[in-house]
Amino acid sequence: MRSTRQARKPHQVGRADGPEASANATRKLSHSATGFLLLSNALKPLYVNPQAAQILFHPEGPAKAKDFAEQLASKIRAMVTNGTRKATIPECKEFLSGGRHYICRFFNVHQPGSESGGANGSSLALLLERSTEIAADVLKICQQYHLTPREEEAVRLLVQGLASKEIAARMNISTNTLKVFLRLAMMKMGVTSRSGIMSKFIHAKT
């Protein structure tokens, strides 16, 4: 049925199972290490780009084409839920793949016309980035929106996945002062939430 067809889509789109496709994905990855995945509400993969497949399966690569969707779903569940049945999905999370350090950002996606709280019309988008590229992106975006050094520092720590208390401790300020810096940054960037700040990194990649 429908869920089965959805699970097979990553194999068709990613094409990361053969030697030639793997080589193509590696060449693309050298230009951009940004991976993108779209998951159903049940965390089943709906779409995965070649970069994401290369990141998640580096260095071993997917074993067989027919098992690709199952392998991918297993890796995603482990990354999103940390092996627990119920977990609050974070805004971003750090992970290692093949000795490389990545940051995964999570974004809720709602189909046009669906209710914001409805499970049937919602999905989850994942953006995978090398941590070495993120610093350059933060600097570029902060300069674009004319953030002050302290606002930039708060945003930089936020996109690294730190919680408010951790960010405040790093900046040697109170959590209330941190909220002020983040609120000012949001106003300048034209967003109203922390996830809105992170969404700027998606637009920067497109």
Image: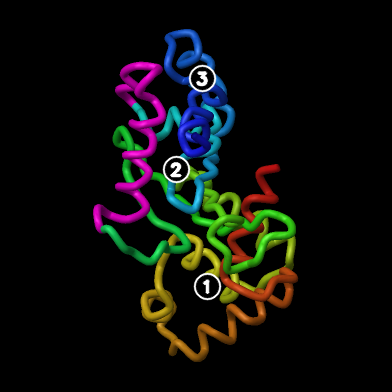
Disc number placed over residue 44 in the picture, else none: 2
**Span of residues in magenta:** 59-84
Disc number placed over residue 15 in the picture, else none: 3
Dot 3 amino acid type:
Arg
Residue 125 location in percent, x, y?
55, 50
51 relative to 167, above or below: above
The mark nearer the N terminus, 2 or 3, is 3
Few, some or many residues within 10 Å of mark 2 (<14, 14–19, 20+): many
Mark 2 vs mark 3: give the one in front: 2
State the separation of the CA atoms marked 3 and 1: 39 Å
Q: Is mark 3 on a helix, strand or loop?
A: loop
The stretch drawn in magenta includes residue 199: no
Residue 147 location in percent, x, y?
67, 71
Dot 1 amino acid type:
Ala
Q: Mark 1 points at which residue?
A: 154
Confirm or deny contact between disc 2 and disc 1 (CB under 8 A). Answer: no
Q: Nearer the viewer, residue 63 or 166?
A: 63
Q: Residue at x 45, y 47 (%)?
A: 131
142 relative to 105, above or below: below
